[in-house]
Every structure is written in structure tokens, then in C-alpha cells.
Amino acid sequence: MLRLEGKFAVLEEISPKYFQPVIEWRNDKSLNRFLNQPFELTPELERRWYEEVYLRDETQCLLIILDKATATPLGTKGWTDFDAEKRQCISGRLLFGNEKFARHPAFTEGILLAYDYTFARADVQYSHVVEENFKSAEHIKKFGFVENTGEVQYPAELLVNGMRQREYFCTREMYLAARKKFERFFDRR
Amino acid sequence: MTNSEKYDGAFCRALGVAERDLLALKYGSVAAWDSAGHMILVAEIEDTFRISLTVAEIMKFNSYAEGRQILEKYGVKLD
């Protein structure tokens, strides 16, 4: 099981002990507006997905971001469609579940830890954002993503559950350049 | 340059907002000030005033006005 550790955050791969917060976040109407989930997630559905899909698929990963000091689950970050040959994946699965930690460094450090890990194995990552989800688009741009105005890599992601999405991409070089903005904060601590 | 001008400048540089919009600025009120933008803003303020905020202060810092109060604890007088 993958585990990444920083100064403020720990990322642990999804396991049954994290089902409850994930289910709560994914069913929260204020959080799931732009998620690809047109149904109520139940413990049984989560267990089946975990056992029958997740554990059998090495191309995807779902990490729980925890506050290192208190082990409080804050949200999720992960990826799908990891292609070792093409050295690319779809980055996403970002869900900010714990509003009390909105400005806590653990959340941003958790995202950086996930990108550090994936960009050590991939040269480019793609992300798909619902057109009306301006906040998410602005958020991923801070980590180096830009809209893909060239050939779309994942056409099936452009229309999901009736929601039109835009494709963004980020190369390792673009990420490392964007990362410098955060190093000023994290390196001194 | 006064401390207030330095404080305003840190906000403008970190978040790309106009000076005229600063007074009403709150966390989340503009796309630039999200969880990631907050780290960039805190680093800019820390560099400007050569201080290091605690995690509790970073979490409490939720508006332009609140940031001024936090700085006063560090002896930074904002006129």
C-alpha cells in the first residue's frame, strides 16, 4: 500500500478504514456537484468497487490526504489510466472534504506529494474539469496545468454524465516550474 | 515604503488582485485565493516581513483584515 509523508501531510492509499469519510464526502451535495457520480454511494457499493475494481487495477490509485499531526482525513487525491509505456496518466480525484482545514498546509502539501510521486514516473499528466467548475480549473493551473488546445488525449472524458469537460495537461517541467511557488513556503519549515 | 504598502503589495503579487479590491478581500472570494493560493500568499507575507506564521495563524488568516491583526502580533505596525 502506497504511503507518502511530508512535513504536514501523510497520504495513505484507500483502504476500508477510510470508506466512511470518503462516502460522506462523495455524497455531500456541496462537494459532489462536479463529480462523475450520478448516484448515492453506499458502503456496499464502495466495498464492491474497492474489491472488484480498485484492487485489480494497477493503473489507478486513490490516496487519502491526512493531517500528519492529528491523522484527520482531509480529502482525496489520485490518478487513473496510468500508462507506464507512454509515461502518462489522468490526474484528478481531488476532493477537499474537510472545510475546517481549508487553509491548512497539509492539503496543498498532500497534492504536491502526489504530484512528486507521479511525475517521477510520468512525463505528462492530463486532467479533465467540468466547464463550469472555474475554481477547479484555477486550482490546477497553480500546479502547472494549462488547457490542451491540441489533440485531445482522452475524448471520452469530454462529456461525462451530461457535463462538458475541458482537457488540461501538465508536463514534468511545467510542474517543477509551478512547484517553486510553493517551495518558498514548505522549504523553510 | 510603509508597512501597509508592503502588506498590500504582498497581496497583489501573490494573488494578482488589484489594490482597490483588497479591503473586502476574503479567502475564497476570488479564484486566486484558494487553498493553494493561500500558501503562496503566506510565503509572500512571511518574506516581506521576515516572520514565520504558526499553523494556527495560517488557518486563522481568512481575510485581508484578519491578516493585518495577525501581523500586529509580530510587532508590525500597519498605518
Image: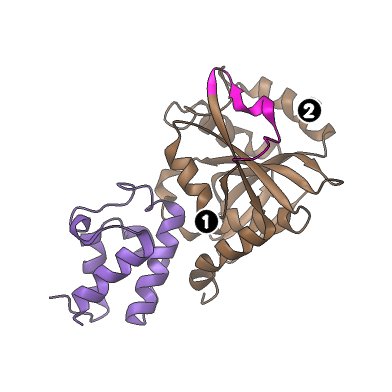
Among the 4 quarters of the image, the one containing residue A52: top right
Residue to which mark 2 is pinned: A53
Q: Residue A174 vs residue A80: left or right?
A: left
Q: Which of A164 and B10 is in front in this view?
A: A164
Residue to which mark 1 is pinned: A108
- The three-letter code of the residue at mark 1 reads Thr
At x 68% / y 28%, what residue is drawn? A155
Q: Which chain's colour is brown? A: A
Taking the image as drawn, is residue B70 in sight?
no
At x 56% / y 36%, what residue is drawn? A21
What span is colored magenta in the figure? A149-163
Q: In which quarter of the image is the C terminus of chain B?
A: bottom left
Q: Residue B8 vs residue A35: left or right?
A: left
Magenta residue check for B36: no
Q: Nearer the viewer, residue A2 or A174?
A: A174
Given the current orientation, which residue lies at the most extreme left position?
B79
Q: Where is residue A178 in the image (x, y as percent from the top left)?
A: 55, 61
Q: Where is residue A166 in the image (x, y as percent from the top left)?
A: 56, 34
Taking the image as drawn, is residue A139 in sight?
yes
Q: Position of residue A64 (x, y in %)?
A: 62, 45
From this view, report whether residue B27 is shown above or below residue B3. above
- The three-letter code of the residue at mark 2 reads Val
Chain B: colour as depicted: purple
Q: Quadrant of the N terminus of chain B?
A: bottom left
From this view, report whether residue A129 is shown above or below residue A3. above
At x 66% / y 61%, what residue is drawn? A173
Among the 4 quarters of the image, the one containing residue A123: bottom right
